[in-house]
Image (tube, rainbow, N blue to C red):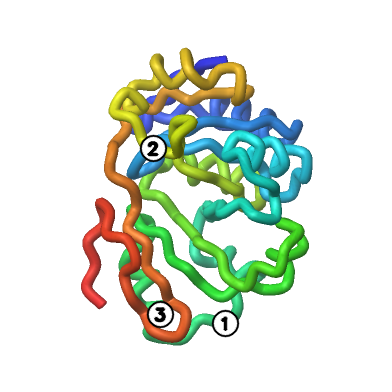
Amino acid sequence: MLIKINKNNIDDRLIEQSVNVLKKGGLIIFPTDTVYAIGCDLYNKNALYNLALIKKVKLNKAKFSIIFSSLSNLSEYVKPIERRTYKILNKSLPGPFTFILEATNKIPHLFENKKKEIGIRIPDNKIITKIVSLLGNPIATTSLKDSQDKIQEYYTDPNIIYENFHQKAELIIDGGSGNLEPSTIVNCIDQIKIIRQGIGKIEL
C-alpha cells in the first residue's frame, strides 16, 4: 500500500495507520532527513527476521540502526552517556546523523547476538518521529538499497520505490522526494570520531 503524507501538514490518521501496520508486524518504508528507509517495530521478532531477510543476512548479523523520537527515550537502550557526548547529541539531533553508542543488555537480547553497541538516529523528519512516538517504542531500520547494497538514484522517487518494494513492505509512505546522501556516522565509544561523512556536518 502506498500512502502520501505531507510533512508540512501531517494527517494524524495516516500516522495512526502506519503505526497499526508496525504493531501487526509489518514493514514500512518511510522518508527521513537522508535517504528513504525501511523499518519495523523493534519488539516484533518476526518483523526483525523479515527485515534481516531483505538485507540477506541472519538477524544476529544484521546491522540495523534504531530510530528514536527523542533523546529522552535512550536510557533503556544505551549505557550512561558522558556529558561531552550528550552535548554533541543534543546539538545535532534531530538531524542527519547516526551516533554509535554503548548498548545496554536489552540490545543483544533483541537481536540475538552479543552486540555491545548500537547506532541511534533521530531524523529531522516529523513523519517518522511522529510514527515512533505514537508506537511507543523505537523502530529498527536500514537504508533502502538495491540487491547489491547500493543506494540507487531512483530510490528518491516514492512511486519507483513502490514499484520495486511493494512486495517486501506492507506500507510505503510517500513523503516527497528523498535524498541520495546517507547520514554521517559518529562513533562515540572511547574516542569520538566521524567514521563516515554523510550529509550531516558536525564539529567535534
For the point 55% across and 45% down, the residue is: 141
* Residue 75 visible to an observer of this rendering: no
For the point 51% across and 44% down, the residue is: 142
Of marks 3 and 2, the one in the foreground: 2
Camera-side residue of 14 and 60? 60
For the point 69% across and 49% down, the residue is: 59
Q: Name the residue under label 1.
A: 80
Q: Is residue 203 left or right of residue 4?
A: left
Please tell me how crowded label 1 is: few (under 14), some (14-19), or many (20+) other residues with Cα within 10 Å: some
- Sequence order check, earlier mark of 1 and 3: 1
**Picture layout, residue 136 above or below residue 113:** above
Q: Name the residue under label 2.
A: 150
Numbered disc 2: secondary structure: loop
**Picture layout, residue 177 above or below residue 151:** above
Real-space CA distance between mark 3 and mark 2, rounded to the nearest whole angstrom: 31 Å
Quarter of the picture containing the C terminus is bottom left
Q: At label 3, which amino acid type do we have?
A: Thr
Numbered disc 3: secondary structure: helix
Q: Mark 3 points at which residue?
A: 85
**Picture layout, residue 147 above or below residue 89:** above
Q: At label 1, which amino acid type do we have?
A: Pro
* Residue 98 visible to an observer of this rendering: yes
Q: Where residue 79 sits: x, y (%)?
A: 60, 78
Q: Where residue 50 sits: x, y (%)?
A: 69, 36
Numbered disc 1: secondary structure: loop
- Circle 1/circle 3 CB separation < 8 Å: no
Real-space CA distance between mark 1 and mark 3, rounded to the nearest whole angstrom: 10 Å
Q: At label 2, which amino acid type do we have?
A: Lys
Q: Count the marks: how many?
A: 3
Q: Is residue 160 left or right of residue 24?
A: left
Q: In this view, does 32 lie to the left or right of 141?
A: left
Real-space CA distance between mark 2 and mark 1, rounded to the nearest whole angstrom: 34 Å
